[in-house]
Image (spheres, rainbow, N blue to C red):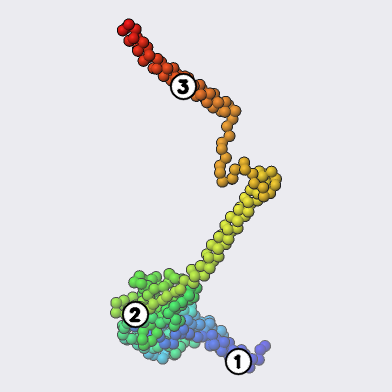
Amino acid sequence: MVPRDKKVLWSFMFLLAGAMAQNIQYRLTSTCAVTGSTVILPCSFTPKKYFIESGTTIPLKVTRARWCINHPLCQGSTPSVYDSDSRNNDPQYQYLGDLEGNCTLQIRGVGMQDNATFRFRMEANDVAGHFTNQTGVNITVVEAIRMKIESSDQNSKFSSGQAISLQCTTSRCTFNHLEVTWHKDGYTLSENGSTLHLSTLTAKDSGNYTCALTSNNMMTQSEPFSLQVEAEEEASGRPLIAGVVFGVLLVLTTLILFIFIIKRKRTTPESLNTAGGEPGKKNADHIPSSVPPLPQKDAGSRRQETVQEAEEVSYVSVQFKQNQQNRRKAEEEPDLTIYSSVATRG
């Protein structure tokens, strides 16, 4: 049998453990919002699992979730912007959480009435499980003014491979919401958060960036933010290209020199053989290599040429004899004419 004082001690310890497990955490304790924009209040909670009454452990379960404005406890008849037990919640306030551990609230179309402190309260099947974190989230609402872009790095020029974050904010405060439109050189980007993350920059990321609230693009568009990314990859590739070109030229030069040396070695023995094996002695019959040798003719061709030459000589001789006979005949004809004339007269 356990002594009474030990029972009280164990009961106190169980009660303390249950109380310590109960908690509500706001990721942001303060934020800014521009009228007409959307703001998200990230929130998580850890409910009490049980409580002890008269030595009996009674389990607890969350059955209700509430968000209130400017009320320290958000209990009883306190007006709520969201109540899980109500069917008439304002659609401007959308509960993104559940009854297990997520209590995130989204506010669309922020107005000046939202310039307040928002608090979350969870309620269980017994009052021992009710809890409100009185810290809350303070929202500062500003009129729709021109946005501006703040860079995570103050440099205007970046190298390839670096990373940068661009924050779309106002001159008064920084806000956290979803409906932001980003533009680059006039073209709409797919990102829609208040922060634009650019990792592993390349030359293609260079350009002029702007941001604006999606609900009021024309009135809230920021001034252009110029981003210049130097193409270090191209610059680093130039020495490599130069080295490759130099290597190719070196190989070609070596190859040409090698061929020249081989040809010269082959030409020297031929010159020695032509000169009778005596280096330095010139041969009158030697024909320089620069003069192409006469084509060699076979015996048949030479015989045919001899016959043709003989026929030509015979033809010329015949022609010569015939010409002599003609001349003699021409000389005899006048004598015959004179003789005939004398004989007639006699």
Frontmost residue, 11 versus 336: 336
57 with respect to 282 (left or right)? left
Which residue matches tag 2? 223
How far apart are the two marked residues, 3 and 1, measured between alpha carbons?
A: 164 Å
SS type, badge 2:
loop
Q: Is residue 330 visible?
A: yes
The mark nearer the N terminus, 2 or 3, is 2
Label 2 crowd bin: few (<14), some (14–19), many (20+), radius 10 Å: some
Taking the view exactly as shown, the residue that stands out farthest to the left is: 219
Q: Which residue is mark 1?
A: 8
Residue that sits furthest to the front in the current view: 346
Element carrying mark 1:
helix
> To which quarter of the image does residue 87 belong?
bottom left
- In the rendered image, residue 2, in percent from the top left (x then y), is placed at 66, 89
Q: Earlier in the sequence, mark 3 or mark 1?
A: 1
Q: Residue at x 31, y 85 (%)?
A: 143
Across and down, in percent, residue 209 comes to: 38, 75
Q: CA distance from mark 1 to mark 2?
A: 67 Å
- Which residue is pictured at 33% across the width and 86% down the height? 142
Badge 3 density bin: few <14, some 14–19, many ≥20, Cα 10 Å: few
Q: Is residue 137 above or below residue 194?
A: below
Of the two numbered discs 2 and 3 in the rendering, the one whose residue sits closer to the viewer: 3
- For label 1, count other residues whose C-alpha is less than 10 Å away and answer few (under 14), some (14-19) or many (20+): few
Q: Amino acid at mark 3?
A: Phe
C-alpha distance separating marks 2 and 3: 115 Å
Point out the residue furthest to the bottom here: 5
On the image, numbered disc 3 is attached to which residue? 320
The three-letter code of the residue at mark 1 reads: Val
**In the drawing, does residue 159 fall left or right of residue 254?**
left
> Looking at the picture, does residue 170 appear above or below residue 331?
below
The residue lying at 51 percent from left, 24 percent from top is 313
